[in-house]
Image: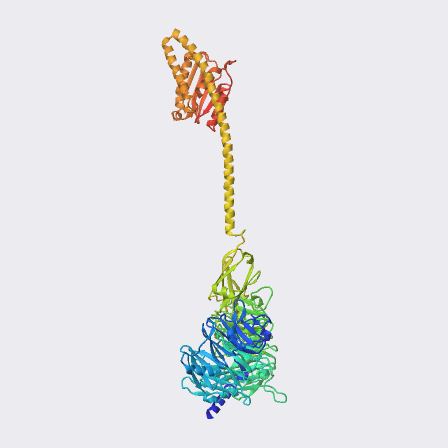
Amino acid sequence: MKKTCIIFLLLIVSVSSVPCQQPISFHKLTGAEGLNDGWVNIISQDKYGYIWIGSMGALNRFNGKTVKRFTHIRGDSTSPLPSICYAMACGTDGRLWIAFWDALVEFDYESSSFRRIKIADGININTIVPVADDKVYFSARSGLRCYNPIANRFEELAMPGDSSTKKLLDKSPAYHAIYKNGLLYIATNKGYIIYNPANKKATFYPVKELGERNVNRIMVDKKGSIWLSNYGGFKLLRMDAVSGKTEVLDNLLLVYQKETQGLAIDFIDGNNNDIWICTFLKGLLHYDTETKQLVQYKNDIRVEGSLLSNILSTAYISKDGNIWIGTTLGLNYFNPRKNLFKIRYPFVDSFLHIFSRGIEEDHEGNLWFTTGNGISKYNVKTGKYNVWQNQPGKPDQIYLNSARGIAEDANHDIWVATGGGINRLNKATGKMDFLTIKDSIPQAFYFSLNKTSDGTLWFGTRDYDGLYYYKPSEKKFHSIANHPVLGKYKGNPGRCVFVDSKKRIWIGYNGTGLVMYDQVKGTTHWWKSTDKGTNTIIGDVVVSIVEDKDGMIWISTFNGITCIDPEKEKFTSYTEENGLKSNIIGSIAVDDSNRLWFGTGAGLVMLDKSRQHFTHFGKEDGLHITDFNEHFAFTLSTGEIMMPSNQGYVMFNPLNYKTDTNSIHCFIAGIEISGGPVADMQGINKNGKLNLKPEDNFFTIELEALNFSNSGQTWYAYKLDGLEKNWHYTQDPKAVYTSVPGGSYTFRYKASTNANNWNVEEKILQVYIGTVFYKAGWFWLLIGFLMIALLVFFYRFRMNKQKQIYSLETKAESLEKEKTMVQYESLKQHLNPHFLFNSLTSLRSLIKSDSKTAASFLDGMSKVYRYVLKSGEQELVRLQDELEFVRTFTELQKIRFKEGLEVNINIDESYFNKYIAPVTLQNLVENAIKHNTADKDSPLVIEIFTEEGFVVVRNNLQRYRIVETSNKKGLASLQTLYRYYSEKPMVIKEDDKYFTIKIPLL
């Protein structure tokens, strides 16, 4: 009894401070967020990470943002049963099992339908406990069952011949069961059973503290201790794993309201010696098994983020450490390790927190708060509050309940700036002083009270001189009007004062901008907002001023944020255009990682140390306060930051927010094509392949990244290799592609909770899109072949035609050549008789007059005719041979004409091997003799020489009037003949003195 009383007293002390603080902010999921109905019976998680919620009227699947409901559809046997879901579990092989009142179903991922397991009909299953792919245990009032999903049969629980185990399990109802460390723990009548699935041995352990009652719920914690609860007797027991002793904890269920006892409905094993206990009527209890400290979390309609209801029904811990609590009004969930934010209230009653404003931590660690309804001191040791608040009919405790700034000076006096004047809580006397103009500080409306690094207190007011300061060492007030440098700024309403690491004084005014006084250089600057340039502050109402680790000065205004580089006099401003959700900025704080935290009119914002990315915190992060006001943030000695709002102080440790913990499970949730959704998503996620028809090249891939802590900070990255070079970074999970050409592609995708850190797991989906025949490669290859074949056919056709034409042309040319040759031969034959007649006449004369010369003449004639006969078989002869023939011919002619004929031959020897038509030169020489006179007085001179590839025959002109034997066809026949032999034309030229013929050498 004594021990029980001690524990009870400990509980009272430990929770005495709970009403002034909400250390956990619960996420909620109700009908308003898409839940089918509020009464949650069971919670589980499937292989993809979805949270399944069995409520009274449906099965609900939650992805962190939206809820998909599965309800019974009359006539559809693949829909959920028209009953209540009582148990649910994901098997070791990923199969999802769901138990209704007297039936069991399996969810089919491929078709998103439900398949009834008829062999289990009639079993009222309380718990589903998967142990292996072929072993799923059911606890039921009728006892324990072992179902083999692979064989679709129930297995024997006991070994053959083990009658004791069989008898025990046959007669014992199984109200609840869990699997821990290879053993099955079963809640039953008057105690519990431990069953070993490996050797099929079962042992019953009675619990005498229960008497005749049964065990309704059982859990084994990390230390091996067993937790038991009984509903009817309001019993809560813990069987210590080390000592084996039973600890009765019924008194925990009496917390706060002793007249109402709660039921321990379910348990969750925490991280370090802590147990979360779901109760009926008492809300959620958090119990430390080492310190015996108990904290209760319950519904408070005045506090957003509290439990939905004090009547809890079930609990579940998911893979990411989130704890899920089922209630009668919906679902709550939270993560104890990621519960970043707490709400600190300035008064015991959270409804009295109106307009939380100033914060101070005194030298003893106590917290002081100023509000719109007075000031308070929170004693961190006792957990109690002292309040200074003006009450009707009572003496005023401060100038005005509307208190704004607060600070402790070096003498440990507490100073308070109110809407009516300055108060000081005198440490020496313990009294609250009301300071007046006699103390050199007027009674006025004060915006703020700032304590700078040198201990000076600065009081900003909208009245009188605008700014006053107090030095504790002097114990004296000064007006800014009397300052040797800053006096010129008197009358401007002071709002905040800050002294940076370089001893520069920064003064923010309420509507007239910002002033900086460099005490080292003795210079001042005054900046105001202007539309003429950006190198100034963004707004003229300066609320707060801080310095970051890099020496940059940050100011908050009602128009955004400005960062000032004092050395470079460079201004950088941030507004909604840069990612802020509101331009109204109040408090600013810098953490040890050099990140900046801003309290804005639309929630809390963090700017990372790269100064590139804003992170917004709201309800999804467990922060239900969004309306931060225009007062200063405060960093406690513990490193925690407190920021005032209109609903209390938001308190958090910034170092607990890790931006590098950004890996979240990502998969493809669905694919839509032009004809509708793709059904086999399970196969696609397993095999990583997607085959589409040519007409399905318009498709949408929907990604899913389950982020239950803060789905609003889920970022996706994706690209389609083969189509895109750059990644898409977005918070939209849908990747839409249109008119994608047929072919093979690789879709790459990943998800992160940090838009600046993509060092996360990347997944791929191989995408193949069929190609219509007229776009397919084989089709165009065939077309190519056909085109080539047509070109070849056309080419060959053309070539054949050209050959035919060429053949005809050749034949025509040959005929023409033959005709020319005939004419030429005719010419030669025509010339020979004349030559023979003239030669014989000359020979006869010589025989009579000179027989010796006649013999020589006859020998020459034989040479001429021998050459003619020989060359008649050749088309061309060497020039050297032709010249020898011409010399013989001219010698014969000289016998006839004597001194009347002169033939000069001057041929370069390099041309001797060139070719010419036979008897060409002879014909030309004979032609010259035939058409010209030749006598001693006027000899005929014939010259034969070479010139630029031609052999030239030239004679002087002394024509006969009439040439009786000329047929006028000789030269024409030669011209025709040489057209076939050479591209160079045969040239015939005549002037007053000479007749010249040029024959091209071949």
**Residue placed most toward the observer, 384 or 39:** 39
**For the view shown, which residue lies furthest in the top direction?**
848
Residue 437 visible in the current orientation: yes
Query: Residue, x 46% and y 93% (percent of image)?
Result: 2
**Residue placed most toward the observer, 359 or 510:** 359
Q: Is residue 682 above or below residue 295?
A: above
Residue 975 visible in the current orientation: no
**For the view shown, which residue lies furthest in the left direction?**
852
**For the view shown, which residue lies furthest in the front direction?**
161
Image color mode: rainbow
Q: Is residue 416 above or below residue 759?
A: below
Tell me residue 846's x, y (percent). 40, 9
Tell me residue 913's x, y (percent). 39, 26
Q: Quadrant of the C terminus?
A: top left
Q: Is residue 447 left or right of residue 473?
A: right
Tell me residue 373's x, y (percent). 60, 83
State the count of labels.
0
**Residue placed most toward the observer, 436 or 687:** 687
Tell me residue 833's x, y (percent). 45, 14
